[in-house]
Image: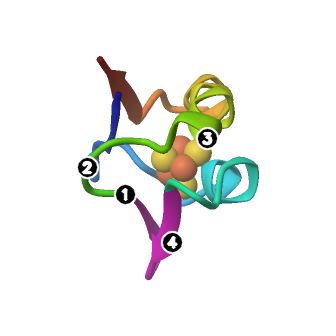
Amino acid sequence: MKAFVDPDLCIGCTQCAGLCPEVFTMEGTLAVALLGEIPAEAVPQAVDAAQACPVSAIQIEA
Ligand code: F3S
């Protein structure tokens, strides 16, 4: 699975980086997702982060 953050939607609330720092980091005011596959052990937290994003900026794709 891979994660993507839409920079046009992200408002920099930082919830994703707090919930799943293995995958999401803040670069300036916006979040960026890890390039490549999400580590298996981090998938649940990555999904939680996507669901927690208040503007639905995160997509998780198989
Ligand atoms: Fe941005 Fe949503 Fe994360 S607003 S900082 S992608 S929780």
Numbered circle sitting on residue 26? 4
Q: Nearer the viewer, residue 2 or 13?
A: 2
Q: Residue at x 25, y 49 (%)?
A: 36
Which of discs 1 and 3 lies nearer the camera? The answer is 3
Q: Position of residue 60 (x, y in %)?
A: 38, 25
Q: Which of the marked residues, 1 or 3, is nearer the chain's N terminus? A: 1
- Placement of 21 over or under 49, stated as above or below: below
Q: Quadrant of residue 38?
A: top left
SS assignment at label 1: loop
Q: Is mark 2 within 8 Å of ligand 1?
A: no
Can you say which quadrant of the picture contains the N terminus?
top left
Mark 4 or mark 1: whose residue is earlier in sequence: 4
Q: Is mark 1 within 8 Å of ligand 1?
A: no
The residue singled out by tag 3 in the image is: 42
Residue drawn at x 62%, y 22% as measured from the top left: 51
Type of amino acid under label 3:
Ala
**Highlighted magenta segment, given as a residue range:** 24-33
Which residue corresponds to mark 1?
A: 34
